[in-house]
Amino acid sequence: MMRFLKLAVCLLIFSRSFSQEKWDLRKCVTYALQNNISVKQADLQIRFAELDFQQSKLAKYPFLNFGGNLGYSSGRNQDPTSFSLITTGYLSNGYSLQASVTLFNWFTQKNTIAVKDFNLQATQAGAQKARDDISLNVAVGYLQVLLAKEQATLASIQVAQTLSQLENTRKQVDAGVLPELNAAQVESQLATDSSSLIAAETTAQELLLQLKALLNLDAAADFDIAAVPVDQVPVLSLAELQPESVYNLAIANLPQQKVDELNLKAAIKSVQVARGNMYPTFSLFGSLGTTYNDKASEITSKTQINAPIGTVTVSGTPYQVYPLNPFNVYGYGKINYFNQLNQNFRQSIGLSVNVPILNGGNLRTGWQRAKLSLKQTELQKEQNSKTLKQDIYKAYNDALAAFEKYNANKKAVETAQKVYDFAKKRYDLNLLSTYDLLISQNSLLTAKSQMLYSHYDYVFKIKLLEFYKGQGIKL
């Protein structure tokens, strides 16, 4: 039985020490920023906002459209070249070039460009917030894995210690110094400690899987993190992280506050856009066009004829009557395609005004809606600022409590260690029962676990304050 337990413990300890690759926090964060889906989605939102901004700038330039047509008409129609009514079927072809430009619309286009610009900047700040959030989440996951590994290490030390106790107790039982009950109690403790080690290892693996998902790594990929002793993690002192100063820096530097400020500016400009839509718009327009008709004809020849127009009889003698001037007889032919396009070329230019009068109240409602949206944005900005301040003060109080708890747990570990050392000496002299020794041993393990947890909790709370301060995450 004892050999089996030794083998199981050795396999557990060996399995947790084997890994092909170790990632530090910098590598984890860098990989996450390049591969995390949320970050990629935020980058796509930037591209959408850039397109909207570019389109709003292009909208201030003149509109220019070219069109062409080719068709056949029959029955009673209007000739597109002479505009006379005809009943002959014909093939027609036409081209047109139309342009228009807004001269003045109460700065609606200018304000629209400003709205899209602020929206783009807000989207960029929002993408930075997404990257910061991912960095923070990766750091939290990294710390959680470190804590789980530390707890697994502590559990493995406990198993090794109990295993050593079992060997010594078994020797004394075999020598007849101690009863078999003592060995059974230690074996039971070893089984409990081994179960705790398995649970700690399982927790560490589950947290590693969660970290993989955050990094967008395949779950089957070989992955492990570099072990960083928690006491070597650089942290600022609480004196450097006073909540009011941290809040002032957060208001000036955090992306979410920039997003709120830019959204407010965009909402102000949106109100101006909605108001400008209710006023007249002045525009300049112009067009060029030409047409072709396959039935169109032109004079190709002219012949002067002085033909008799009648006869008269004078004294019984007939005489032919001629006009005083000869008249012309014309020959007709089809007009050349390009000549016809040139002859039918037409131009137009003009000034137009569009005055909104009755439109179902849509424009005025839009203006009022924009003002309400502005108010809503102001309230959201105020709410986010208050929430940020509350979070910072809470983080500071939590860090202070974690620091005090860590110091108390350190003292508890020192006391529990002394109790265990005395108990071990008495046990070695057969002055203490195995049950009492195991109680002191478990009390020491519990104290160490609590100290380890409070230490990591304190480090995380400090790192959260450093994050609010704008210093990023460093381990």
Image (tube, grey):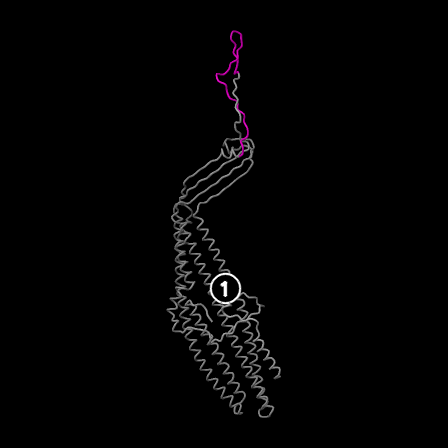
Given residues 155 and 31, the one toward you in this image is 31
Above or below, 140 relative to 297? below
Looking at the image, which residue is at 42% across and 46% down?
359
Above or below, 255 relative to 200? above
Main secondary structure along the magenta-highlighted residues: strand
Percent x, y of residue 250: 40, 66
Percent x, y of residue 417: 48, 84
Given residues 139 and 420, the one toward you in this image is 139
Looking at the image, which residue is at 55% across and 37% down?
71
Residue type indicated by callout 1: Leu
Given residues 20 and 135, the one toward you in this image is 20
Quadrant placement of the N terminus = bottom right
Looking at the image, which residue is at 44% across and 40% down?
286
- The quarter of the picture where residue 195 lies is bottom right
Label 1 sits on a secondary structure element that is helix
Residue holding disc 1: 33
Given residues 231 and 321, the one toward you in this image is 231
First to last magenta residue range: 308-337
Percent x, y of residue 414: 46, 83
Can residue 317 be found in the magenta stretch? Answer: yes
- The quarter of the picture where residue 374 lies is bottom left
Disc tally is: 1
Above or below, 119 relative to 360? below
